[in-house]
Amino acid sequence: MTRSRRLTVPRCRLTRAVALGVALAGVVAINATVPIARADQRHFQVVAATVTSQLVQRPTRAEGALLPMIERLLQARAAERGRQLTRGIEPLTRRDAALAALRNNLTMDIASGEPQRLSQVVTEAEAVFDPVFDLEVGYTRNDTFTRTKIGTVRENVFAVTGNEFIVRDPLDSVEVGQIPQSVLDGLTPEQLAAIEDVSLAPISRRRLNLCAFEPRACETEAPVIRALEYYQDFSPDIVQDEITASPGRSGNEGHPVQSVNVTLGLTQELPWGGTLTLTDQTIWRKIYYDPDHYWKDGDWTTNFLATLETPIPFGRGFGADNANRAAIQRAEIARERADWSLRATINATLGAVDVAYFELVRQAESLRRAVRNQRLVRQLRNRTERLYDAGEGTRYQRAQAQNELVRAGLRVETALQDYINASIALARLIGNPDTRSGVTLYLPYAYSQSFEAELPAGFDDAWRTARVNRPELFVAALDTRSAEVTARQAEVDTRPDITLTASIASRQDNSNYGYAHPLHSHNRIIRPDTLNQSYTVEYQWPWMNRGLEAVAARAQLSVESLRLGERATELEVRREIATQLSDLQSARARVSSARREVLGRRRAYASLDRQREVGIVGHDELINALRQLLIAELAEVEALVDAEQAETELLVAQGTVANTLPRRTVQTRLDRRRVDMLADAGVLAYFGKPEASARR
């Protein structure tokens, strides 16, 4: 069997419990460390009791009677159904319900992280204008090596004949000792002159390249001399020679060419559009002017390159509405919109929980009145039984009283089930798994004072409040602002696309010598060896520019559509305010009439009860009076709860339920003072009235 919590020790009182614990801990500490008189101890006890009375919300007498009444009804229901009591009862105030909803509601958890995420999106968009640094360090070295070849060296010289000389590998040639006369007879004068020109060497050191030995290569049947090859040196002696692989070192007096490059780049996106790039390249390199000497104070040189690429004024991509700036503006609007969306979620969540809480109050008060009616009917039945036993009552009266008692019991059972259903519905919004399954029931208390506080009701004041607090109005306005930013960017993109590119390169050449220190080379960068300047204007224009103009027209239509949506949202909020004001005024009027009706029915029942004692009226009139009294009391409960729910809905329509609810849930003077101090300190200002400039 689950034990129920008593109202004198409510849960969810962390703030008050801490304060009370501090006060009591101070009393205990003083008593433990300082010997004091008995009168002083009584004084401390009185102080602790006073603090406790100011902190703890105490239920009214009627509210305090709810707990034993519901426990008794649950026990009776469990006994009738032949099982043990499995339901516990958890006391819950109006403020506790709101705090539990903010703490456990999953929708709240999802919405609460959206502003932080979009804040990072804003940071990401703004990071486009952060400078980008590029550092590059490189080392290069070019070495030239020599190769040594040992063996017979034969250098070939070729005599070209005619215009058809083909370089051939000597291995494919035929070496001959004498030129055949038949070959000489077939030579032209030019070929004979060529042979005589190369006849300086012995004929034994010559060889002919004849196409006759390769018939496929000859275009005619007669052999043709393509070239006469001979050797300048046919010495068989072994020689040693050094062959240079490449002349790389010859430009640096035989030393390797090596350098260290340090390049520092800076890229900056410009606010009006375009990009500025600055590159500083510092080079260390030794330049030899002699195989053994170099200029020791001339190793450093600097090259500086500046490039500016920007659209021209009044051109595409220029101004405050360029792509990068527009992205930042949309991100900032999205972040602000997420904040208002979170407020809208909190506003709707607190409104739904508050309405559900008072629905639980409605069912609890209806149950209490149904039980009270059952008690009065039981008293009437008992008196009828006594009169019947004494022979003064009829069987019809006895049966009539018993039948009315059964009806009263059915009304109590129905009211109890409605109370359980209302508790489960509230638990779904709060997020307690036990109460969602009905294992634990919520018991409302400390709510009577809410019925006494009335919210000022006036359409003009309510609308002015809603214009600066209702989140949906700001969300619609921010959507329009975001669309306007996109439309302005699209309009800028339809302009002529003219881009100016300017590049200036200042270079120092250390082919002879540089500077002794990199600081010196930087100081003299304005006096370079070479200065290269380049200026380019690029113009792009799509044919008839139809695509970009269509995008701009579509963006403008989106703006107009969202403006209409903004007006529709305002009309919807005005309708909600008017509806809730009408419901509130109607409920308040019904409260006044219902209270008068209850007072009159109670007096009528008391009068009939006295007349019944003397036999002036019968059971029918008395039972009917009880029914009318119950109907009047239930109507009073309906009117009171409807008025309170209408006030909550009006606060939701105004968007002020979050910053109004703390003051509407205070129960003690100390608690009211605490809430006022928090409001003065700005702790509750998050849901306060924003500046009027927040909306257009």
Image (tube, rainbow, N blue to C red):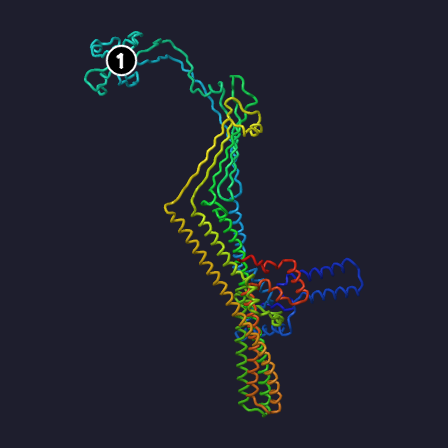
- What residue did someone put label 1 on? 208
Nearer to me, 427 or 32: 427
**Total numbered badges shown on the rendered structure:** 1
- Which image quarter: residue 435? bottom right
Q: Nearer the viewer, residue 20 or 582?
A: 582
Does the image show residue 148?
yes
Q: Is residue 314 above or below residue 650?
A: above
Relative horizontal placement of residue 148, taking residue 650 as reference (left or right): left
Percent of width and height locating residue 87: 56, 69
Relative to residue 332, is residue 224 depicted above or below? above
Residue 38: give x, y in percent of width and height: 79, 65
Above or below residue 101? Residue 584 is below
Residue appearing at x 54%, y 52% in the figure: 116
In-image side of 665 versus 250 (left or right) = right
The one nearer the camera, 138 or 569, is: 569
Residue that extends furthest to the left in the rendered view of this protein: 221
- Quarter containing the N terminus: bottom right
Residue 411: give x, y in percent of width and height. Answer: 53, 78
Question: Between residues 251 and 407, which one lies in front from this camera angle?
Answer: 251
Amino acid residing under circle 1: Leu
Q: Check disc 1 and report its element: helix, strand or loop.
A: strand
The answer to whether 236 appears left or right of 597 in the picture is left
Residue at image x 53%, y 60%? Answer: 471
Choose top left, top right, bottom left or bottom right for residue 521. top right
The x, y position of residue 519, in whole percent, is: 58, 29
Quadrant location of residue 99? bottom right
Q: Residue furthest front?
A: 314
Crowd band around label 1 with a 10 angstrom C-alpha radius: few (<14), some (14–19), many (20+):
many
Note whether residue 354 is visible. no
